């Protein structure tokens, strides 16, 4: 009998994937877990270890491998998000999009569209608005200002958002970021301190940068949403004064955000471009790694592919599954990483 699903991985309070305990791979030195997405997609095998699983999942998230995809069903198409299920079905009136909030148990249908492509575009736009306006469970407001005396992960978080403080204001202003422009001295100091912190605390068996990027992206999103919901200033670095905006800048941002909110992928790309790439240049122990082209961890500790024949024990009992099948029901988000 194959083992049942026995664990979840949360990134910044959001359930990301489900784990299934399995035996270790040759040479790995320990047992591990097979990783699965919401729609029964096998994501690979990873050994257990301090921050290793979270770092691998964060790398998959930054690389877009956890993004939901449309799948064919007998009645049309289906997209499975961690919270929402979208069904596109053909009726006598046209192609209809059915939206189900799995957590609240609510169901809603959009107006019929003439073609399937138009219905898919309408569903994608709605998902972008639903996810883009949802506040992340983790907030930066609870962090202490004296990060030199706090735990490692809190210091890491404060330094990450401090490095993005000046650039994050550009998301509200809607101005293009120029990667070649000089960095403020405050940003340089925060980047150097964060790189030194990672070098001092983490061993050289995986790349911790994606995990830092996801943490920073979550808090950048929370700060931007607070501006959209009525705040007039942005507070990211507790050791620095808040960033203020004029009334015209706030009105222009809220109107722009109302029509087309930033997606989670936008925040991840922003944090990776403005923090991750620079941090890799300063982080000595992982300078040779060029994520995402190279593995996030050594082959003995992380294997990105599962084969139904070679790794039968890592697969659920019901395999293969029908396309568009939700693997497990989501629960309410919790706070934490």
Image (cartoon, rainbow, N blue to C red):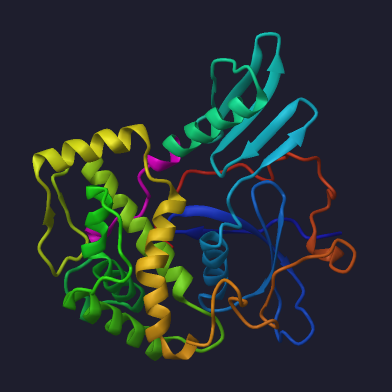
Q: Quadrant of residue 8?
A: bottom right
Q: Is residue 229 visible?
A: no
Quadrant for the N terminus, please: bottom right
**Residue 227 picture location, percent across and down:** 21, 44
The part of the image, by quadrant, that contains residue 9 is bottom right
Front one among 315 and 75:
75
* 287 on left or right of 86: left
Name the residue: 28% across, 83% down. Answer: 193
Name the residue furthest right: 309
Magenta range is 130-142
* 293 horizontally vs 62: left or right: right
Residue 203 visible in the picture: yes
Q: Is residue 197 left or right of residue 183?
A: right
Q: Position of residue 277 (x, y in %)?
A: 42, 74
Across and down, in percent, residue 234 comes to 18, 53
Name the residue at 28% across, 52% down: 171
Q: Is residue 174 left or right of residue 242?
A: right
**Residue 133 magenta:** yes
Is 154 situated above or below 11?
A: below
Residue at the (47%, 90%) spot, across then down: 285
Q: Is residue 205 above or below residue 309?
A: below
In the rendered image, residue 156 lying in the magenta stretch gets the answer no
| Quarter of the figure with the C terminus | bottom left
Residue under the image location 54 percent in, 74 percent down:
291
Tell me residue 209's x, y (percent): 45, 74
Number of numbered discs overlaid on the protein picture: 0
């Amino acid at each position: 009998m194959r083992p049942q699903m026995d664990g979840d991985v949360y990134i910044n309070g959001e359930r990301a994937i489900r784990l299934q305990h399995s035996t270790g791979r040759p040479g790995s030195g320990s047992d591990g877990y097979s990783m699965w997405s919401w729609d029964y997609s096998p994501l690979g095998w990873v050994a257990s270890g301090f921050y290793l699983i979270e770092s691998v999942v964060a790398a998959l998230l930054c690389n877009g491998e956890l993004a939901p995809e449309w799948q064919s069903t007998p009645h049309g198409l289906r997209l499975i998000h961690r919270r929402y299920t979208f069904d596109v079905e053909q009726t006598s009136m046209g192609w209809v999009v059915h939206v189900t909030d799995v957590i609240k148990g609510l169901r809603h249908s959009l107006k019929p569209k003439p073609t399937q492509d138009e219905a898919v575009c309408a569903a994608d736009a709605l998902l972008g608005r639903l996810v883009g306006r949802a506040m992340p469970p983790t907030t930066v407001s609870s962090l202490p200002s004296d990060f030199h005396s706090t735990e490692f992960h809190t210091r890491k978080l404060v330094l990450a958002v401090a490095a993005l403080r000046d650039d994050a204001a550009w998301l509200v202003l809607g101005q293009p970021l120029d990667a070649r422009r000089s960095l403020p001295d405050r940003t340089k100091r925060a980047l150097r301190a964060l790189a030194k912190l990672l070098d001092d605390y983490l061993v050289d068996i995986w790349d911790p940068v994606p995990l830092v990027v996801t943490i920073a992206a979550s808090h950048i999103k929370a700060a931007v949403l607070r501006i959209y919901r009525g705040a007039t200033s942005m507070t990211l670095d507790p050791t620095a004064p808040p960033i203020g905006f004029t009334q015209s800048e706030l009105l222009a941002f809220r109107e722009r955000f109302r029509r087309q909110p930033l997606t989670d992928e936008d925040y991840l790309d922003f944090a990776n471009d403005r923090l991750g790439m620079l941090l890799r240049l300063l982080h000595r122990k992982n300078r040779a790694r060029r994520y995402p082209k190279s593995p996030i961890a050594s082959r003995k500790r992380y294997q990105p592919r599962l084969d139904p024949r070679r790794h039968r024990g890592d697969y659920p009992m019901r395999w293969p599954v029908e396309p568009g099948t939700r693997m497990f029901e989501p629960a309410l988000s919790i706070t934490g990483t």
